[in-house]
Image (spheres, rainbow, N blue to C red):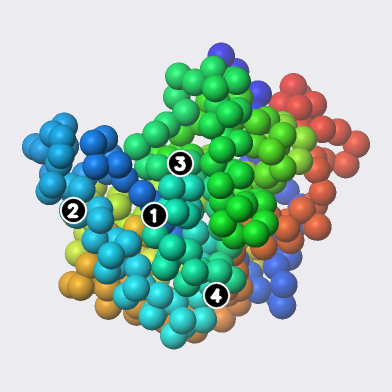
Amino acid sequence: MDNDLFPYSPIVDRPAIRWPGGARVAFYLGLNVEHYPIDRPSTNIFGGTAGLTPDALNYGWRDYGPRVGIWRLIESLDRHGVPASVLLNSDVCARYPQIMQAGIDREWAWVAHGRDNSTYQAGMDRETERAYLTEVVDTIEAAIGRRPQGWLGPALTETFDTPSLLAELGLGYTLDWTNDDQPYELAVPGMLSVPYSIEMNDVTLFVSKSYTGPEFLEAVKDQLDQLYADSADSGRVMALCIHPFSVNQPFRHKYLDQALEYIAGHEGVWLTTSDRIAEVYREQRGPGRPGSTVAEEIAR
């Protein structure tokens, strides 16, 4: 079937994007703060036990994040002045109150990221998914005192109904479509796609590709340097997507800290959140191309 969510749009043919303060690259840190049920499989470091209940090996590896890793990360974020865009499972709100309070105190951005990281929408009908998304969004709103503006599906999963259901709930962007270095409009009125990276992602680099800490640091630097070079005429977005159970292991953490130091000290970089990126883009571009809707662009 044809893709009717967004049209093909070569980056060289678009109006220029300008970021605040003359910055060329908008950088946000996508911080995955997740809950993993003990009786369900999910991201794993060793597939040999991934189907067991309980799976002490993989569950314990993931559970290192909220118990230890995130507190090491917070020290680095505070030191370098980097805000977090928290990709938040709604179950975290009740289960890890100290993490919630730390984020509220620092005015982090909160992006809805499903109920937990083992529940996907795949296979849900529209009404089931509407009820599920409503529960997730309402739970987060009650915890942080405002409606989340963005969405990232667990494992970046959606149904064909997800964007329109999110719009019904008052959300304005999704991070699920990892196909661009700039935000763009979706065919659902009011919905944007904001860049997220499955490549510039610690689980991909460390678990799937077996990068070392120094290789991770070099990859982050290379990503920023290339995007900065690309942005001479129009702004770009760099997302660095992390999981505290992975990159904040003791032997890796210093390389993330050095990466944040490099990013924070780089000329022309706006340290921001995914919420603010969506907001500034919307202020500049508005919905769709002048005189047409995104749906009309798809049909061209």
Q: What residue is disc 2 on?
A: 60
- If you read the primary sequence from the N terminus, does the residue marked by circle 4 or circle 3 appear first? 4
Q: Quadrant of the N terminus?
A: top right
Q: Is residue 195 visible?
A: no
Are there few (<14), some (14-19), or many (20+) residues within 10 Å of tag 2?
few
- If you read the primary sequence from the N terminus, does the residue marked by circle 2 or circle 4 appear first? 2
Distance CA(mark 4)–CA(mark 3) = 23 Å
Distance CA(mark 2)–CA(mark 3) = 20 Å
Q: Secondary structure at mark 3?
A: loop
- If you read the primary sequence from the N terminus, does the residue marked by circle 2 or circle 1 appear first? 2
- If you read the primary sequence from the N terminus, does the residue marked by circle 3 or circle 1 appear first? 1
Are there few (<14), some (14-19), or many (20+) residues within 10 Å of tag 3?
many
- The residue located at (36%, 49%) in the rendering is 35
- The residue located at (24%, 61%) in the rendering is 64
Horizontal side, residue 167 vs residue 285: left or right: left
Tell me the number on the disc at residue 95.
Answer: 1
- The residue located at (56%, 51%) in the rendering is 140
Q: What residue is disc 3 on?
A: 115
- If you read the primary sequence from the N terminus, does the residue marked by circle 2 or circle 3 appear first? 2
Q: What percent of the width, then of the height, locates residue 157?
A: 46, 33
Q: What residue is disc 4 on?
A: 105
Q: Secondary structure at mark 1?
A: helix
**Dot 4 amino acid type:** Asp
Horizontal side, residue 207 vs residue 28: left or right: left
Q: Nearer the viewer, mark 3 or mark 1?
A: 1
**Dot 2 amino acid type:** Gly
Asked if 1 appears above or below 215 in the picture, the reply is above
